[in-house]
Image (spheres, rainbow, N blue to C red):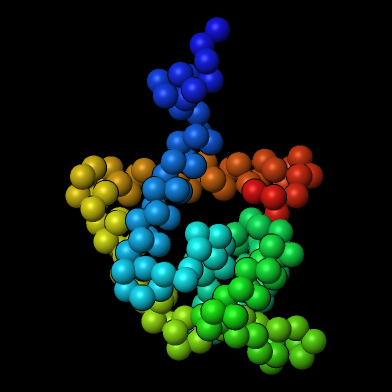
């Protein structure tokens, strides 16, 4: 029987491929952000930063979108608040709830990250061809959605994904 490492080198499974892609994109994004003065951010902060909106978003929504437990999102928001990237404000539609908003520094970081991600995507689209890259993203999104739906059908908590 082949060693697991050999199998994953020769024919990596979906989890290995998805992990390699995620970690490589994160490394490039956070390395380039650090070069722009955002070196205090960690990869784990991406679970919040990727879904942060100028109009504010609830922690429960960040949890749902990212697939992380609400408690983890709460800890990440605490860290980002201490670093000056986000702030909590009362939700105008429900005073008991809080919305997480980017600060001015958070908005600058959001714009920089958007530019970096657009650059990464353009690079891959040039390499594969625009139509192939569009098809790749469509298929990857479909697989991702199908996997998350399958988890829900099993009654599995997506918060650990």
> In the image, what residue occupies the spot 66% across and 57% down?
68
* 77 with respect to 95 (left or right): left
* 111 with respect to 128 (left or right): right
Note whether residue 61 is visible. Answer: no
> In the image, what residue occupies the spot 35% across and 44% down?
135
Looking at the image, the residue that sits furthest to the front is 40
Residue 111 in percent (x, y) is at 36, 76
> In the image, what residue occupies the spot 63% across and 68% down?
76
How many labels sit on residues?
0
132 w.r.t. 7: above or below: below
Residue 119 in percent (x, y) is at 26, 61
Residue 146 in percent (x, y) is at 59, 43
106 vs 122, nearest the viewer: 106
The quarter of the picture where residue 88 lies is bottom right
95 w.r.t. 30: above or below: below
The quarter of the picture where residue 129 lies is top left
36 w.r.t. 26: above or below: below
36 vs 106, nearest the viewer: 36
Residue 77 in percent (x, y) is at 63, 74
Q: Quadrant of the N terminus?
A: top right
Looking at the image, the residue that sits furthest to the top is 1
> In the image, what residue occupies the spot 32% across and 64% down?
32
* 95 with respect to 36 (left or right): right
39 vs 22, nearest the viewer: 39
* 72 with respect to 11 (left or right): right
Note whether residue 53 is visible. Answer: yes
């Amino acid at each position: 029987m082949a060693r697991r490492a050999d199998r994953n080198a020769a024919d990596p499974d979906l989890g290995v491929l998805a992990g390699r892609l995620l970690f490589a994109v994160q490394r490039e994004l956070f390395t380039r952000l650090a070069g722009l003065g955002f070196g205090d951010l960690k990869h784990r902060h991406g679970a919040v930063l990727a879904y942060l909106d100028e109009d504010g978003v609830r922690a429960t929504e960040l949890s749902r979108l990212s697939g992380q437990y609400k408690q983890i999102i709460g800890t990440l928001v605490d860290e980002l608040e201490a670093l000056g990237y986000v702030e909590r404000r009362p939700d105008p539609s429900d005073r008991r709830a809080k919305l997480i908003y980017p600060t001015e520094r958070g908005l600058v970081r959001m714009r920089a990250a958007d530019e970096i991600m657009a650059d990464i995507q353009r690079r891959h689209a040039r390499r594969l061809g625009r139509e192939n890259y569009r098809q790749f993203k469509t298929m990857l999104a479909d697989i991702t959605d199908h996997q998350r739906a399958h988890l829900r059908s099993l009654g599995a908590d997506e918060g650990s994904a």
